[in-house]
Amino acid sequence: MVRTLPERAAALVTALAAAVVVIAIAILPFLTPAWVSFEQDRTGAAALTGYTPTELRDATNSILHDLVIGPPDFAAAVDGQPVLDERERAHMRDVRGVFAGFGALAVAAVVGLVVLAAGAARMGHPERAWAAVAGGMRGLIVAVVVAGVVVTFAFDAVFELFHRLFFPSGSYLFDPRTDHLVQLFPFDFWSETTLVLGGVIVVLAAVVAVLAGRRTRTGRRSTDASVGVRSVDRDATSPDRSQPETAQSEPAR
């Protein structure tokens, strides 16, 4: 079936919106104290900061609270001493701004998906929206796999590029010997989290792709069946022109 340019554009936007929503859902578990505490234990954050496990947990949970919920004070303290200095707090406010921007994008993507799916259903082709979602998931899987290969061999460069794109120059540079921010969240914390996040995105995208593919096939069968019924109805109600017309009898004389 040949589609118009607006229909192709709608399919592309649907695919991109679905990818954004899946990424947003995949990120959520990594903002929880459970994951952060687990990864801090793996990367030796307590030894780097010199905090006790309780102090480390309390300081980290305070920072996570300000990052996710707010207000963005980032005024965590241990024994009355601030954990982060002003440069570190300023960077965390920048981080919160990036998260807020992505959160707004995710909300817009959800709204866009609902609107586009409703539009496809109104046009009588709901399967097109599901097909676009499935295509978006396949594209997302390929993109994440490629990014994962790049990150595995060049994480330093990718990490630096990411910060240059989203943060003011130099605002993200800290000394791991003295700055608590990079002691709480050391380099290995981010490299391992990034790789696990990529794996979660791939799994979620694969599940959504399978479900969307099934809905697409079901929708197409329903559409084909309805088209067939309408065709049969038209044939049944149309006059049979295959038989020759009977000549009218002449009137009696």
Image (cartoon, rainbow, N blue to C red):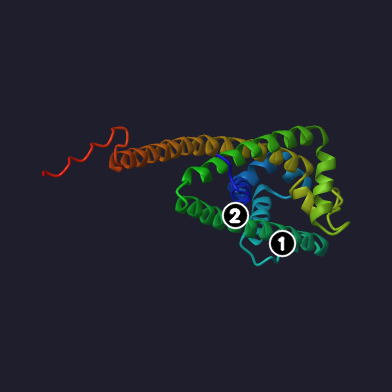
- Classify residue 105 as left or right of residue 181: left
Identify the residue at image location x=60%, y=39%. Answer: 135
**Quarter of the figure with residue 230:** top left
- Which of the two discs, 1 and 2, sits closer to the camera? 2
Q: Give the image location of residue 49, x and y in percent.
A: 77, 49
Alpha-carbon span between mark 1 and mark 2? 18 Å
Residue under numbered circle 1:
97
Q: Nearer the viewer, residue 8 or 108?
A: 8
Q: Nearer the viewer, residue 42 or 155?
A: 155
Q: Nearer the viewer, residue 141 or 15?
A: 15
Residue 50 appears in the rendering = no
Instruction: Choose the circle earlier in sequence order: 1 or 2.
Output: 1
Identify the residue at image location x=62%, y=40%. Answer: 201
Query: What label sits on residue 109 in the rendered view?
Result: 2
Other-residue count near label 2 (Cα within 10 Å), few / some / many at <14 / 14–19 / ≥20:
many
Q: Residue furthest left?
A: 253
Above/below status of 25 relative to 84: above
Residue 195 appears in the rendering = yes
The amino acid sitting under disc 1 is Gly
Other-residue count near label 1 (Cα within 10 Å), few / some / many at <14 / 14–19 / ≥20:
some
Q: Give the image location of residue 159, x and y in percent.
A: 80, 45
Identify the residue at image location x=28%, y=33%. Answer: 244
